[in-house]
Image (tube, rainbow, N blue to C red):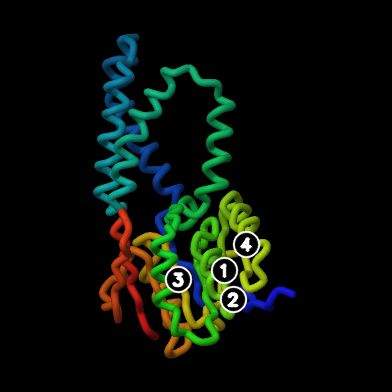
Amino acid sequence: MPLSSPQTEPAETSPPTFVSPLRQLALQLAAMLVVLSLAWPYYGIGSKDLPWPQTAFAIGAIAALFASLTSQPWWWRIMHALFAPLAWSVSRLAIDPGWFLLLSIGLLLVYRGALTGQIPLYLSNRPTAAALATLTAEVHGLRFLDLGAGIGSVVHPLARERPDGRFTGVENAPATWLIGRLRTAGLANCDWRWGDIWRTDLAAYNVVYAFLSPAPMTALWQKVRQEMRPGSLFISNSFAIPEVEANSVTDVDDTRRTRLFCYRL
């Protein structure tokens, strides 16, 4: 019989407010409106063809400027600068619209977290899983939680190596959740859950691991401090908590130069 795992229940901590995708859309539309409004007196009234390559690059430049003026993260500035030129370039390929719909659905199934919470899909590698096994080797009664568990690349090997521990993975992107569910189906000490990391109660776990992005780390640390018990361990892959010194940092021997920031509660 599979071991019972702590339930994933709504916690009191509210999810952080991230940059809304609608705001990014508004910035693109504003840039488009500015460029087309400036071009209209010359090209529209004169019934001349609009030079779309130059127009697309102008829209990208204005969108990037708006993103900078509104203090958007650097990756959004790059995306704003490239969106219109890439859209124009792709439109020249005469691709059937159905492929775009299929691609959009596929991206949503895999990268849902990037759209809803600025948390892209980062997959932990085998050296990282091995380093986590070392870090938790002396933890008795191990109850390990992976927030944003992807395809189970951490909980799967750890659960196989530590049959005495209990491992939970929480994921909310449909495609990656399904892959992780299939990978962990035969592990009695592994509980694979569909859920929101902000509604996951951390109190029942003595080790919590996350490989997310810089955006949620401040809010996540607040949640960790409120919910995790004294003596428990929070580990963040690659992204340190701003203005909080880690108790220790483990350098992983891999090509990514992965660093594991460890915070003891």
From what the image shows, is residue 229 above or below residue 147? below
Give the residue drawn at x 42%, y 63%: 211
Neighbour tally class for label 1: few under 14, some 14-19, many 20 plus, Cα within 10 Å: some
Q: Which residue is mark 2?
A: 163
Front: mark 2 or 4: 2
The amino acid beneath tag 3 is: Tyr
Neighbour tally class for label 3: few under 14, some 14-19, many 20 plus, Cα within 10 Å: many
Decide which of tag 4 and tag 3 comes sooner along the chain.
Answer: 4
Q: CA distance from mark 2 to mark 4?
A: 13 Å
The amino acid beneath tag 4 is: Thr
Q: CA distance from mark 1 to mark 4?
A: 10 Å
Q: Which residue is mark 3?
A: 209
Front: mark 3 or 1: 1
Decide which of tag 3 and tag 1 comes sooner along the chain.
Answer: 1
Q: Which mark is residue 184?
A: 4
Picture coordinates of residue 86, whole percent (x, y): 36, 29
From what the image shows, is residue 112 above or below residue 156? above
Neighbour tally class for label 4: few under 14, some 14-19, many 20 plus, Cα within 10 Å: many
Q: CA distance from mark 3 to mark 1?
A: 17 Å
Give the residue drawn at x 57%, y 32%: 101
Q: Which mark is residue 201?
A: none
Q: Are marks 1 and 2 in contact (CB under 8 Å)?
A: yes
**At numbered mark 2, what does the secondary structure look like: helix, strand or loop?**
loop
Decide if residue 98 is on the left or right side of residue 185.
left
From what the image shows, is residue 249 above or below residue 206? above
Neighbour tally class for label 2: few under 14, some 14-19, many 20 plus, Cα within 10 Å: some
Q: Are marks 1 and 4 in contact (CB under 8 Å)?
A: no
Q: Which residue is mark 1?
A: 160
